[in-house]
Image (tube, rainbow, N blue to C red):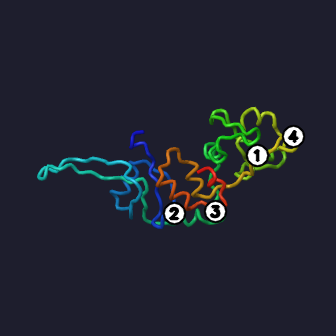
Amino acid sequence: MPPHTQPILRTDAAGMPLEWIDFKRAVTLQCLGQVTYAYGSTSIRIRGGFNRRLGRQSYMDVNSIIATRGNHQALLKMRDTYVPPLHNLPLFQRDGSLCLYCGGRFSHRQLSRDHVTPFSQGGMDSWNNVVTACVRCNNHKAGRTPQQAGMKLLAVPFTPTHAEYIYLQGRRILADQMELLCAHFPRSSPLHQRI
């Protein structure tokens, strides 16, 4: 994998995960003096121009994790009322790309979002009411609850914390990034079992 495609984990100054950024944004933050410290492995080395007098080329190392000034966003996301936006990719990641009815593992193209309690019966489009289902199981269940359809739900849906949500958005997570993210998961997180 080319190093310039590796996402950089941005945290606040206290080490609370905030988001994934690309190396260009990381370099911009570093040049603007917004990076308070960097840690983790060196993800990429950006080379600059040559110093005419010394004949040396300038460079900037970008680490896999950078901490930036300010933590107001992290404080908001730490509150109990924070709910991450619901999108299919993080949902499928949360459920391990498994259909939570038949237990089969599928590609993301073969999966769908199923509402445990359907809209027609008062269900909401929320993390605690949606699960990953293969297209076949979702069509079979239709507008019924799992009990009404005679289907067993294999896991209880849950709302991820902000750190869990960042993990679920990641595609190529390095070991040092994973270690930091896991440190911010609740002890009861079902994601611990997968890592």
Q: Secondary structure at mark 1?
A: loop
> Separation of disc 2 and disc 1 at Cα?
32 Å
Q: Residues within 10 Å of mark 4 (few under 14, many from 20)?
A: few
Q: Residues within 10 Å of mark 3 (few under 14, many from 20)?
A: few
CB atoms of marks 1 and 4 within 8 Å: no
Q: Earlier in the sequence, mark 4 or mark 2?
A: 2
Q: Earlier in the sequence, mark 3 or mark 4?
A: 4
> Separation of disc 1 and disc 4 at Cα?
13 Å
Of 2 and 192, nearer the camera is 192
Q: Earlier in the sequence, mark 3 or mark 2?
A: 2
Q: Nearer the viewer, mark 2 or mark 1?
A: 1
Q: Which residue is mark 2?
A: 16
31 relative to 97 in the view: left or right = left
Q: Which residue is mark 1?
A: 154
Percent position of residue 164, x then y: 59, 55
Q: Amino acid at mark 4?
A: Gly
181 relative to 88 in the view: left or right = left
> Separation of disc 3 and disc 4 at Cα?
33 Å
Q: Nearer the viewer, mark 4 or mark 2?
A: 4
> Separation of disc 3 and disc 2 at Cα?
16 Å
Q: Secondary structure at mark 4?
A: loop
Q: Which residue is mark 4?
A: 150
Q: Amino acid at mark 1?
A: Leu
Q: Quarter of the image containing the N terminus?
A: top left
Q: Which residue is mark 3?
A: 187
Q: Secondary structure at mark 2?
A: loop
Count of labels shown?
A: 4
Q: Secondary structure at mark 3?
A: loop
Q: Residues within 10 Å of mark 1 (few under 14, many from 20)?
A: few
Q: Nearer the viewer, mark 3 or mark 4?
A: 3
**Residue drawn where x is 11% and y is 52% of the image:** 53
